[in-house]
Structures are given as structure tokens and as C-alpha cells.
Amino acid sequence: MKTLTLVSTIVLVAISGCATQKDWSAAGGSKSDGTVRLSYQMGLFESPKVSEQQAISLATKRCSVWGYSSAEAFGAEVKSCNNQASNGCNSWLITKEYQCID
């Protein structure tokens, strides 16, 4: 019985740890500052694959509404816990800021 439980746990962790495609979504920004914030959520055992091209495209679309021609990454990704459990964090919000440019 212990062997079955151990094998089941290993299989569950292996499946959960697989790479998953994540898409950026708009999370805020400032027209007056010409910045756009994008984010995605990541679970405990996820190994996310994100597309910087998809992020630039989304940020550029948001910036174009404000009269800018494109966008570029502005700083590093910020990882913050958004679901604290008794044994630690089991979900994070990853956020990145983009600067609108002419």
C-alpha cells in the first residue's frame, strides 16, 4: 500500500510539473506615464512557458489606444504570492511592466 501511495505521488508531481503555456493579460497601467502592466498566474508545480512576443504585442495594442506606436519591456518580472497556504505559497502572480514608446 505504501508503494502504491509513493508511486501515485511521484506520478502526480511529475504530471503537475510539466511545462504549461501561459498567456500574458493586461493587469493595469497608466496613460499619463505611458506604461502597461501585464501578468499571468503560476501554480505550485507549474513550469510556465510564456511568449515575450505575445507580451510585446499585447502591450503595443494597449499603448496604441493612447497614441503610442509600440512598447518595450521596462524592468524585470515581479513574482508575488497570491494564495498563501499553511505550508507556504501555492500560487504566484507574475507581473511585468512595459513602456509605451513613439
Image (cartoon, rainbow, N blue to C red):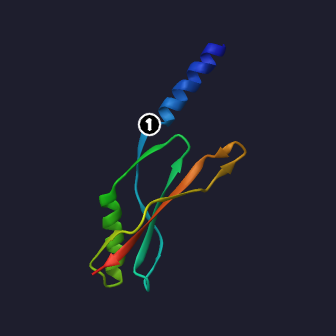
Left or right: where does residue 15 sit relative to residue 62?
right
Residue 15 lies, in percent from the top left, at: 48, 32
Residue 96 figure quarter: bottom left
- Up-down relation of residue 87 to residue 26 (above or below): above
Closer to us: 88 or 1: 88
Nearer-the-camera pick, 11 or 84: 84
Q: Which residue is mark 1?
A: 18
Residue 56: x and y in percent read: 32, 65
Residue, far front:
75
Which amino acid lies under the numbered mark 1 shown in the image of this protein? Cys
How far across and how far down the image is residue 94, in percent? 49, 57
Q: For the N terminus, which image quadrant? A: top right
Q: What x and y, as percent, mark residue 10?
A: 54, 25
The residue under the point 54% across, 29% down is 12
Q: Is residue 47 above or below residue 12?
A: below
Residue drawn 66% across the image and 15% down it = 2
Residue at 63 percent of width and 20 percent of height:
5
For residue 36, what is the image quadrant?
bottom left
Nearest the eye: 4 or 86: 86
Question: Could you tell me which quadrant the C terminus lies in?
Answer: bottom left
Q: Residues within 10 Å of mark 1 (few under 14, many from 20)?
A: few
